[in-house]
């Protein structure tokens, strides 16, 4: 098998083998090798350049419509070897290695051997790989930006719903309770805020400082978990944690 692979790599040719047995015991007396049919008129040096279409693209390949196999044959491989590679490897992977060969600069002993070796060892184009990694990083950044934008939108909606939830509760309170809330709120103030509200006798739930006091200390809040359930939003643990931190 190692000899077959080495021949395949260097020439694009392959072979099959089977033991020859004799007698009742089936003793192996010989080994029969069957090599891929060679083109008798083919110049050995032709592997240094592209093989003419009349030789490289057998009618059988075209009839099957197997463009990938036909391309491989065009590089000097036998139809059997080309078919073996097409079965073993996915078409995009083969085309990737063909593109790598086409971009190769410098001497090349055998196009067939280059492609086979590239397939077996998964050769990469350094510039192509860097472009791929750059694109992956760009996509990852975009995905993260989209995720954070979505979380900010959810947070803004939650804050709005929480405010409306508190307002509905506050409007149902007796006036005496509202008056008591305001007195308690004023008792917590000092400095600039105390001076501000000293000259602002009339204020209500619309004032952000008073509203924050009432919602935080006096009214049952709308929890983030309750809002997500009401909105039918299912978040990952990571998204939930980041949402709470906003």
Image (cartoon, rainbow, N blue to C red):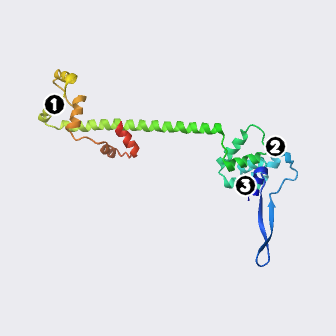
156 or 131, which lies in front? 131
Disc 3 is placed on an element classified as helix
Q: Nearer the viewer, mark 3 or mark 2?
A: 2
Percent position (x, y) of residue 139? Answer: 52, 38
**Number of the label disc, if any, that sits on residue 67:** none
Q: CA distance from mark 3 to mark 2?
A: 22 Å
Residue at 66%, 42% (x, y): give it.
124
| Quarter location, residue 183 | top left
Q: CA distance from mark 3 to mark 1?
A: 85 Å
**Mark 1, other Cα within 10 Å: few <14 / some 14–19 / many ≥20:** some
Asked if residue 207 lies left or right of residue 12, the reply is left
Task: Name the residue that disc number 3 marks.
Answer: 83
Asked if residue 197 lies left or right of residue 38, the reply is left
Q: Earlier in the sequence, mark 3 or mark 1?
A: 3
Percent position (x, y) of residue 197? Answer: 18, 23
Query: Would you say residue 167 is visible in this rendering?
Result: no
Task: Name the residue that disc number 1 marks.
Answer: 182
Query: Would you say residue 89 is visible in this rendering?
Result: yes
Disc 2 is placed on an element classified as helix
**Number of the label disc, if any, that sits on residue 48:** 2
Find out whether the residues at labels 3 and 2 contact each other: C-beta distance under 8 Å.
Answer: no
Which quadrant, please, contains the N terminus? Answer: bottom right
195 or 27, which lies in front? 27
Q: Earlier in the sequence, mark 2 or mark 1?
A: 2
């Amino acid at each position: 098998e190692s000899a077959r692979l080495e021949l395949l790599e260097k020439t694009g040719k392959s072979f099959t083998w089977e033991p020859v047995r004799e007698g009742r015991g089936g003793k192996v007396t010989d080994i029969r090798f069957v090599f891929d049919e060679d083109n008798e008129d083919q110049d050995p040096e032709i592997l240094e350049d592209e093989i003419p279409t009349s030789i490289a693209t057998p009618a059988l390949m075209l009839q099957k419509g197997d463009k990938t196999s036909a391309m491989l044959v065009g590089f000097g491989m036998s139809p059997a070897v080309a078919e073996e590679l097409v079965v073993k490897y996915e078409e995009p992977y083969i085309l990737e290695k063909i593109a790598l060969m086409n971009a190769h600069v410098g001497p090349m002993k055998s196009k067939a051997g280059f492609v086979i070796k590239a397939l077996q060892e998964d050769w990469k184009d350094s510039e192509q790989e860097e472009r791929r990694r750059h694109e992956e990083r760009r996509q990852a950044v975009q995905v993260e930006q989209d995720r954070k934008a979505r979380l900010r939108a959810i947070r803004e909606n939650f804050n709005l719903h929480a405010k409306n939830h508190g307002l509905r509760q506050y409007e149902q309170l007796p006036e005496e309770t509202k008056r008591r809330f305001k007195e308690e709120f004023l008792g917590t103030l000092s400095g600039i805020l105390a001076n501000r509200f000293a000259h602002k006798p009339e204020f209500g739930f619309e004032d952000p400082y008073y509203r924050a006091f009432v919602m935080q200390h006096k009214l049952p809040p709308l929890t983030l978990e309750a809002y997500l359930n009401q909105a039918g939003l299912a978040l990952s643990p990571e998204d939930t944690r980041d949402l709470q931190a906003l």
